Amino acid sequence: MTRIRNLLGRCFLAVTVGAAAWSAAGPAAGEGRPVALAVDATDAPRNLLHVREGLPVGAGPVTLYYAKWIPGEHGPTGPVVDLVGLQVAAAGRRLAWRRDATDMHAIRLDVPRGVTDLEIAFDVILPPTADGFTSGASATAGLLVLNWNQVILYPLPVAADQYRVSSCLTLPAGWRFASALDSVGQDSAGVRFATVSLQRLIDSPVLAAAAFRRLALTDPGVRPPVYLTVGGDTEEALAVPDSYLAACRKLVGEATALFGATHYDRYEFLLTLSDHVAHFGLEHHQSSDDRQGAKTFTDSDHRRLGATLLPHEYAHSWNGKYRRPVGLATGDYAMPYNDELLWVYEGLTNYLGAVLAVRSGLQTVEDFRSDLALTAAGLAARPGRTWRPLQDAADEAQLLYSARSDYDAWRRSAADIYDEGTLLWLEVDVTLRQLTGGRRSLDDFCRDFAGPPGGPPAERLYTFDDIVRTLEHLAPHDWRGLLNERLQAVTAAAPLGGLTGSGWRLAYREAPTDLQRAASSVYEMTDARFSLGLLLSESDGRAGAIVDVIPQTPAARAGLAPGMTLVAVNGRRYAPEVLAAALDRGAQAKSPLDLLVERQDLFSTYRIDYQDGQRFPALDRNQDAADLLSLIAAPLTGDRR
């Protein structure tokens, strides 16, 4: 621990001197002296971070705050329970503190007269499990994704875009790093970053790893530049296929053509490839925290299933960061979010992520259609739509993100905002094209809404009325009525107007598409939602675990429930192929299925009267309508397919 503390002290001294120099240079009015923040990550392989902080204060009561409402996570997910060993001192004397009785993220103390700085020290425990987003596993023996909101205390009240922080990070020997933050110096004590606002700091995670590659996605001299940084547990995981790299470069051009301008000085894709961290994507204005499995570059199935991740997070630089819903721009991390416009923030971005993936070549046209079919069928198999409208799912998103998976189709989940949002914005796109004879589309909306003028990071807030106004400018129509109808609808029928209007229809086939087959293999799931009404997991050594049962389906009517385990099908030990064969035989012989199920050490047999075989969603072409879906998938740059 002595070596660690010595390194931390040297890093802390460096940022303290830097902060003093910045202060002497004359901060802008109201900004005051910056915080000096030093993070020692040399113990990150042991899931520990050590923090020292020099915090300018005045005498009297002070409230220190640990960020609670985390941008991009849309809820109160700041992991304050992982802050440990807190000590606060002034002029070498330790000060007493007490946690607020109603807000656990707030620490209250009294600062003695004459004190101008607090010396704060604490550790942060990084969890070993993948539950959660950034509060899940973020470090392994060879890498770390550092999110700054987890390693800083700041005083309330504060304007996050004005409060200044000088930071320093010490990494294990041999590790390299990337971030949207600019480094201003590096030595054995650590890397020092430029002084930035608290908002910019928290919006700029760091990816550090021993196995590390940084690749340019834009040509030399092109401004603003874009980079793909890959960190993994092994060098083998970093073997970026040439086709993937070419598609990422095309993604930059397609996104720029879509929006017509950029709103960043430099963009960093921070891609972590590991089986030992939480898997998700989190948007930032000038970077994205993208996490996938270790086989992403070495296995085509893993790669195709993650095809929309980078396009989705990249689109957020425009929709979500540059254009931001009023309710998600609180100016601080203690103020609750209002997620009512998440169907724009995430729903539109999900649609654009799919469109950009196919336009750039990260996803094939066949997979684009297969993914859309699965989205449409999944919503059609969600009876929760009969009581919870899309608007309510957005309103309650801060809770739904952490909801359990059992009876998910009846409860609905945060994923519905993304999926139903995709179908909603497909309908808007198709309607624009139909109203204008193909002269206008959602591409035009993107340019009008989140495009020029370009420049450095900025924030423009929007409301529901701004969405309606932009659409009406493109094509006169009752857009308010259409959007409200989709947002408030409580019906079992999935919103397929955009799909049918684009020249395609939802259908079901006896065999899965290649994308669906890949998903079953990689995610170790058996998807029988569209036949029996079952979703089963084959992972964690518990084959046949029933994850969900769709209400009003044959499985539900027979009495099956989440939490049970399927043991045998028609007297044979369960395996995915055994269930598939039984469904095929049942369709031919018109015979029921007998399922042996275990629940809490008790075994029961359930007879399911189902004889329609396997069913998997797909899209069929409607030759009586124009193929707008293919036009939507066509790239804007280079050769148009």
Image (cartoon, helix red, strand yellow):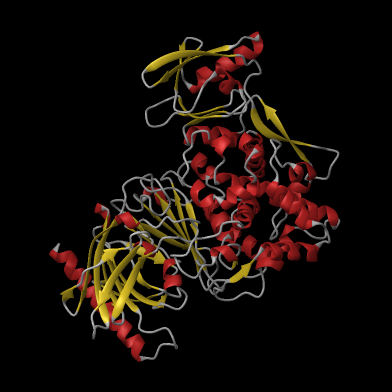
Return the x and y of residue 330 as percentages of the image width and height.
51, 67
Placement of 203 over or under 410, stated as above or below: below
Q: In which quarter of the image is the N terminus?
A: bottom left
Q: Residue furthest left?
A: 2
Could you tell whether 401 is left or right of 379 in the image?
Answer: left
Q: How many marks?
A: 0
| Residue sitting nearer the eye, 124 or 364 | 124
Q: Which residue lies furthest to the front in this view?
A: 101
Q: Is residue 61 visible?
A: yes
Residue at 34% over, 71% down = 63
Could you tell whether 476 is left or right of 50 in the image?
Answer: right
Residue at 74% over, 47% down = 630
Q: Residue furthest bottom?
A: 25
Q: Can residue 382 be seen in this view?
A: no
Placement of 562 over or under 134, stated as above or below: above
Q: Quadrant of residue 207?
A: bottom left
Residue at 73% over, 58% down = 442
Could you tell whether 141 is left or right of 330 in the image?
Answer: left
| Residue sitting nearer the eye, 235 or 302 | 302
Return the x and y of residue 353 as percentages of the image width and height.
61, 53
Q: In which quarter of the image is residue 323?
A: bottom right
| Residue sitting nearer the eye, 635 or 328 | 328
Residue at 34% over, 67% down = 152
Return the x and y of residue 366 as percentages of the image width and height.
66, 40
| Residue sitting nearer the eye, 489 or 312 | 489
Placement of 504 over or under 635, stated as above or below: above
